[in-house]
Image (tube, rainbow, N blue to C red):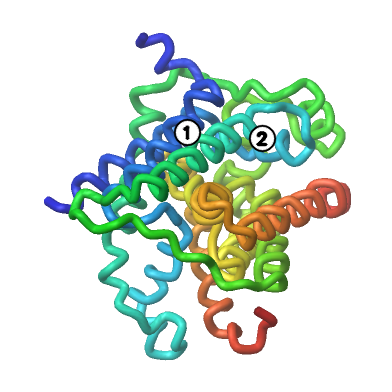
Amino acid sequence: MLDFILQPWPWWFSGLILAGIMFSLLFFGNSFGFSANLRTICSIGGAGKKVKFFDFDWKKQTWNLVFLLGAILGGFITNQYLTLPDQVVDISENTIQDLQALGFAAPTSIQPSELFDIEALFTLKGFLILAIGGLMVGFGARYAGGCTSGHAISGLADLQLPSLIAVIGFFIGGLIMTFGIFPLIF
Amino acid sequence: MKFIKYLIVGTLFGIVMAKSEAISWYRIQEMFRFQAFHMYGIIGVAVVTSIIGVALIKKFKLRDMAGNPILFYPKNKSIARYLIGGTIFGLGWALSGACPGPMVVNIGYGFMSFGVVFVFALLGTYLYGAFRDKLPH
């Protein structure tokens, strides 16, 4: 049992828990949609004074901010207590080779040090990758009306065509970045 | 106290994102390169289970814990906003290796650089709000 928890969790187990989280939020009278928090935080920061889109009763989203705090806590707990030391992500050999061709060393943890070490953040290229990546995720999530949780899980669960279109968009963008832009920037 | 259940479920979300390695940039690359089933398995099981559950909620008109009916609202019909917005999202997802949830889980995990990703995601959200009227929806 303890060994099962400390090892990386299998896809089927993780998928079932995600569905359980989605149902829990429905049972609590809300719905699963993480990126709504980004809008809420903009509103709390006073964006509603300048831009009408952020002028809404954000207090109704307090539950979602608490969920966000939980997500941070969950990451902390996993790293501190639920993971074997020196856990290396077990990705496919093909991916390792493809990424090596782009200049990434084989994984030594769950994130590439080339992108997420603090030293990388203080290079112009490293900073721009994180900044532009985040910018596009935030802009695109609100433009599409949701992110992976709101569209790929909540929306598809309700068989909503708009969510399917959004998920297709996620993949169009991801494939353009991976196969079109990565060879130019790495 | 009424928020404690959201803290618990949010914490479980953070744990499952981290333990399934869905917060890993490598896993997102592996997914977009179609080189493993892992991420498709996670999302696939979540979606199929959710589809069945939502159908049952509708069929039996189940209620939430406050006794209100659980309702599902159809999203506005459009192609442009979902396709263009989704594509921009996907570009950022592949580049940073994280959608909004995993960004904050990564911060908790100790990858502080994701704080920068998250701040710029907030800025992106703000820019959408500011230019919303000029974008095709």
Q: Is residue B77 above or below residue A73?
A: below
Pinpoint the chain carrying mark 1.
B
- Residue tagged 1: B18
Q: Is residue A46 left or right of residue A124?
A: left
Instruction: State the residue in front, A139 or B61.
Output: B61
Residue flagged by tag 2: what amino acid is it? Tyr
Could you tell me which residue is drawn at 58 percent across and 57 percent down? A160
Say which element carries label 1: helix
The image shows residue A123 at horizontal and vertical percentages of 66, 54
Residue A170 visible in the snapshot: yes
Q: Secondary structure at mark 2?
A: helix
Q: Residue at x 63, y 33 (%)?
A: B39
* B46 sits to left or right of B12: right
The chain carrying label 2 is B
Whether residue B28 sits left or right of residue A29 in the image: it is: right
The residue nearer to you, when weighing A53 against A115, is A53
Q: Position of residue B90 (x, y in %)?
A: 69, 55
The numbered dot on residue B26 is 2
Q: State the quadrant of the C terminus of chain B.
A: bottom right
Q: Earlier in the sequence, mark 2 or mark 1?
A: 1
Report how far apart the C-alphas of labels 2 and 1 lie in the structure. 13 Å
